[in-house]
Amino acid sequence: MKPIKRLWLIEFLREFYEKLVGKLPLPKINPNILSLLSIAASILFVVVFGISRTVGILVLLSAILLDGLDGAVARKWRGAFRTSEEAGYCVDLYSDRLSEGIIFSVFFIPWFPLFAANCLLSFFGAGARRHIVLPLRGVFLFWLLLFGSA
Amino acid sequence: MNTLFHFFFNYLVVSGAFGIPVAREEILIILAASTFIDIDHLAYIIRKRRLLAKFNRRLGPESHSELHELFGLTLFSAFFLAAYFLGWGLVAKISALCFVLHLAVDFASGKTRPLRPFSRELVYFLHLSIRKKVIFEILMTLAAGGAFLLLWLG
């Protein structure tokens, strides 16, 4: 299997972020479980947002943070779990798209077309062994914070 | 996960996300959107029925097609988007949510190859024997069914 290539800027930011997060006392937990929790948080977000926007935004933030933590946890505890790097990448990429799909099925316009584009990028990116995706949930969170509604 | 669980679970999430009560037509949409993708299991069973009967094989990740994975997500997201712009707004939204939830539940509870056909890497979170898996599915379906009934009657 060829290694996954990322854009140099993304790679630089990712390494910087993971160095920063790597200094934190990260729990010894399978990073794939964190990706799964990110999907669960997305489901909770779409249910809770209609009841309390503040709690909804906090849940969305936790989904994004959980997704961001899995890479750092995987690097810190490399070799501690019986999962390959390839499996970790599959889980990370697919769970990100599922999480986005759940959120943007509810907040459809203008987000769902961007999600569909992200799926295309992920699919063809996986074929070309290049990681090119749009950070949609982060942008959506800023959108919610700035405008208060989607 | 079984089709009944998908329906109960999707109903609960859709009613939470889009508001209660869910109208009768919307229940039909949830039912259809939660179950149609499982037709690819059926295609596998028909194709491999002799093999399944002879060797008592389980319905593993090979029993569902790429439609249960990133390829299907990409394909159907374009389909739901087209449905939305053709004027089927709520139908597209509910169907998209049910479809993605179906994939998410199957991803969490079963074995998948998410990046097929580009990667054959098999990923799973639960590795249970057939007996334990059946008990797990029954318990989960009963729990989701109970919550569904509570919401339906309440």
Image (cartoon, coloured by chain):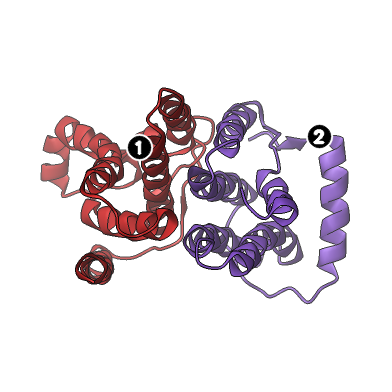
Q: Nearer the viewer, residue B137 or A116?
A: A116
The three-letter amino acid code for the residue at tag 1 is Val
Of all chains, the one bearing label 2 is A
Residue A72: image location, x then y, percent: 75, 61
Q: Total number of numbered labels?
A: 2
Location of residue A8 with respect to A76 vertically, above or below: above
Q: Residue A96 versus residue A6: which sits nearer the camera? A: A96
Eyeballing the image, is B14 above or below A22?
above
Picture quadrant where residue A19 is located: bottom right
Q: What chain letter is assigned to the residue under label 1?
A: B
The residue lying toward the viewer, choosing from B118 and A1, is B118
Query: Which residue bears the numbered disc 2?
Result: A7
Q: Position of residue A93 (x, y in %)?
A: 60, 44
Q: CA distance from mark 1 to mark 2?
A: 38 Å
Please give the name of the residue rendered at 26% of the width and 53% of the height, measured from the top-left corner: B7
Please give the name of the residue rendered at 36% of the width and 48% of the height, measured from the top-left corner.
B102
Mark 2 lies on a secondary structure that is loop
Q: Secondary structure at mark 1?
A: helix
Residue B91's tag is: 1
**What shade does chain A have?**
purple
Q: Is residue A6 visible?
A: yes
The residue depicted at 81 percent of the width and 73 percent of the height is: A24
Residue B108's disc number: none
| Left or right: residue B58 compared with residue A96 | left
> Residue B104: horizontal and vertical position, in percent?
43, 51
Along the horizontal axis of the image, is A2 left or right of B154? Answer: right
Q: Quadrant of residue A20?
A: bottom right
For the point 37% across and 30% down, the residue is: B88
Give the residue type that dot 2 points to: Leu
Which lettered chain is shown in red? B
Q: Quadrant of the N terminus of chain B?
A: bottom left
